[in-house]
Image (cartoon, rainbow, N blue to C red):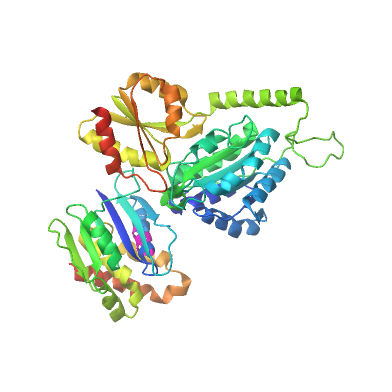
Amino acid sequence: MTRELWKGNEAIAESALRAGLEAYFGYPITPQTELLEYLARKMPEMKRVFIQAESEVAAINMVYGAAAGGARVMSSSSSPGVSLMQEGLSYIAASEVPVVLVDIMRGGPGLGNIAPTQADYFQLTKGGGHGDYHPIVLAPATVQEAADLTYEAFDLAEKYRCIVIVAADGNIGQMMEPAELPAPRQIDKRDRGWELTGAVGRERRIITSLYMQPEDLEQVNVRLQGKQKQIEQNEVRYQEYLLDDAEYAVIAFGTAARVALTAVKWARAKGIRVGLFRPISLFPFPYARVAELSKKVRALLVVEMNAGQMLEDVRLAARDALPISFFGKMGGTVPFPDDVLPEIEKMVG
Amino acid sequence: MQHEIIISGFGGQGALFAGQLLAYAGLAEGRHVTWIPSYGPEMRGGTANCTVIISDEEIGSPLVRRPTAAIVLNPPSFDRYEPLMQKGGVLLSNASLIAATSKRSDIRALPIKANEIAAELGAAQMANVVLVGSLVAITDVVRLETLDAVLEEHVSARHRDKLELNKQALRRGAAIAQ
């Protein structure tokens, strides 16, 4: 395989195809549209299912149906579109069918704008729809990582029969970077014991999110929570930069982490012993590692392209062990390294 | 060495394509590259820009406020980026459309009549490529030969007849900047 220049949205689309995506349902929205366009071009040629639905609400319910039928399925959208999908996502979570969703985040609240933000953190990591559930949420910082995490998302979704969301800001969708995409693979179409394939010659199966008896629904919730514990144990992902001898740490994800890394290197050049901690899984959040880190360094700076959402998880992890400061850019304005460097200097005091 | 380049102009002047040329050439030379377009609600006649980073090391921030080099194709782009240039930076402006010149003594500002040069070659819309040639001559960000190869690979079938003209445009741009 060779490194090629890929646009983030197209790398995600191609990576999903190579992971064995069989059916896609979506509705165009900037800054995600190239993803859907790429699949619209490729999937009919490959004799796979592509449908541009009449709305995001319809798309997510088509995803639900195809997933219940055992297909490897995904949708993609951007913030307002993902809001529209929340009812369907809650049904999917309750029904325990594997689904991959890509959110190329844009400015909000409301119709907002099409510029890059990370302001869907709460909605994505804390459930989004009604009821007790969390999707797995993976946040890439490069086009390469967006491709790799998308590929892996299908396996995770099937392993836990849950929703996996690839959460990237508009920058990552629009940016071109060299990437080496994962190899195409055949998917294993063995019957997994739950999918609806026609009950000829076997017991019928039911996929539902409706349990009228509270005791029955309690059992479903207990099972979902158990699965969530497993996910919290097995699927925490993060990357650390220059933290070995660090006295201070910056915590950021996605594009904000890359901006912060440049500022961290500038600060290092000025003699400040600072490093960067980058959560890759936003759910499960790396609470334990942040807790360790907060005992090791003197102060933390959280940088996000929102008003301070991951900040709350950092505070949960760090308790009151150390001072935590925050720098955020909102509304689709982006941070630059020369915005973050003074914040690092302020943290050091 | 990290080159942080902004290319900006009216939609249709080829700012994004010029940036992609540089990014593909950087990749072909085994460097680290990023290319980010402005993707705002642009309209015909509006300004489009892209940021290209070409580096020997892994790239942190793909976002750049103060470029080391800029190609500005229209007056609004000049007004926006001239004050933001890093000290020692290279500002190439399309003097065919931009009357203003830089008063800064800490940057290298070069006005080039790129539309006229491109028109002499036979296609005025190659002004962007002329200025890429100039940029390469001054900054050595990538090699001209690499850009030739990139053009051969990426000029679409519809514009195949313009391939040699584009290569000439690169060289005219390079020659005038030297």
Determine whether, in the image, residue A275 is placed left or right of residue A73: left
Residue B126 at x, y = what percent?
A: 34, 73
Query: Would you identify the image quadrant in which residue B159 lies?
Result: bottom left
Residue at x 72%, y 23% (from the top left corner): A219
Residue B42 at x, y = what percent?
A: 43, 63
View extreme (left): residue: B105
Residue at x 45%, y 24% (from the top left corner): A316
Frontmost residue, A116 versus A64: A116
User: What range of the chain is rendered magenta?
Assistant: B17-22
Q: Can residue B75 be seen?
A: yes
Determine whether, in the image, residue A218 is placed left or right of residue B156: right
Residue at x 65%, y 27% (from the top left corner): A224
Q: Can residue A289 be seen?
A: no
Vertically, is B79 above or below A76? below
Position of the C terminus of chain A, as image quadrant, is top left
* In magenta stretch: residue B20: yes
Frontmost residue, A298 versus A270: A298
Determine whether, in the image, residue A182 is placed left or right of residue A311: right
Query: Would you identify the image quadrant in which residue A342 lies?
Result: top left
Residue A237 at x, y = what percent?
A: 47, 31
* Magenta segment main secondary structure: helix
Frontmost residue, A330 versus A37: A330
View extreme (front): residue: A110
Residue B58 at x, y = what percent?
A: 33, 43
